[in-house]
Amino acid sequence: MEETIYQRVDNYLSKTFSLEDSILKETESSIVQNGMPEHSVSANQGQFLYLLAKMCNAKNIIEVGTLGGYSTIWLGRAIKGGGTVKSIEIERGFAEVARRNIEKAGLSDCVEIITGNALDILDTMNLNGEPVDLFFMDADKPNYINYFEWALKHARAGSLIIADNVIRDGKVLDEKSTDEKVLGVRAYNEMLAQNDKVISSVLQQVGVKEYDGIAISLVK
Ligand SMILES: C[S@@+](CC[C@H](N)C(=O)[O-])C[C@H]1O[C@@H](n2cnc3c(N)ncnc32)[C@H](O)[C@@H]1O
């Protein structure tokens, strides 16, 4: 199939900024080789997460939904030398692939991949009294509001709470949708719009991945 203009521009930006080194390319390959879903963020989206982590001076990062660790590597590189990333993945096999990729990236000292259902893990997580500076949710959409509530409870003023895939190829417009993912992100966007504890912006995104979007919330 011919590449769209959005995909060509995404590739142009990724190449111009030399976003992907061999570690990131090998991480992507490991996802394909292990028959895992190709649902990682793109290189440009990874760089954007990296930038956001730097902008909020993140030391403690929590990610829900690791897959093969592609976005985790971007986040780990953002805090390298001064912080930790805890990334939660429900699929044991995916978590093992991610751990190997994190090791190859030289990030095992600051990145922990935790296997389990995210809400259960978060419930018992010990943060040693430190706030979460950046929370990135990229997993089961019906639980997005639950993840947000947990993140808000453990945030500080200036923390970022980020939710991926909140546009879903425009399906977010469908008021009659019965798709639990669409219902999950519609409820999430509507909750954000009403929540006065955060300032939020939802960005539509196009590129090498599907047409989708990301919600970014700054804790007041
Ligand atoms: C979109 S992928 C994550 C992609 C990854 N953040 C990246 O960009 O490289 C979503 C992942 O969330 C995991 N997941 C789904 N439900 C989960 C849950 N309840 N707890 C933890 N992980 C979950 C899936 O197994 C899948 O690997």
Image: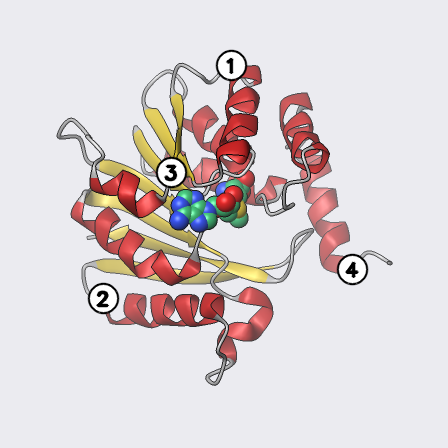
Which image quadrant is residue 82 in? Answer: top left
In the displayed structure, does residue 188 sit left or right of residue 66? left
* Residue projecting furthest to the bottom: 176
Residue 201, x across and y down, in percent: 38, 61
Q: Is residue 69 depicted above or below 165 in this figure?
A: above
Is residue 14 visible in the rendered image? The answer is yes
Q: Amino acid at mark 4?
A: Thr
| Label 4 CA crowd tier, 10 Å (few <14, some 14–19, many 20+) | few
Mark with earlier residue (4, 2): 4
Report the residue marked by disc 4.
4
Q: Amino acid at mark 3?
A: Gly
Report the residue marked by disc 2.
195
Mark toward the viewer: 1 or 4: 1
Residue 42, x across and y down, in percent: 61, 44
Judging from the image, what secondary structure is the residue with disc 4 in? loop
Q: Are marks 1 and 4 in contact (CB under 8 Å)?
A: no
Report the residue marked by disc 1.
106
Mark toward the viewer: 4 or 3: 3
Q: Amino acid at mark 2?
A: Asn
C-alpha distance separating marks 2 and 3: 29 Å
**Residue labelled 3 has its Cβ within 8 Å of some atom of ligand 1:** yes
Residue 29, x across and y down, in percent: 71, 31
- Count numbered badges in the picture: 4
Mark with earlier residue (2, 1): 1
Mark with earlier residue (1, 4): 4
Is residue 138 visible in the rendered image? The answer is no
Pick the front one: 8 or 170: 170
Report the residue marked by disc 3.
116
Which image quadrant is residue 112 in? Answer: top left
C-alpha distance separating marks 3 and 1: 23 Å
Mark toward the viewer: 3 or 1: 3
Q: How is the image coloured?
A: secondary structure
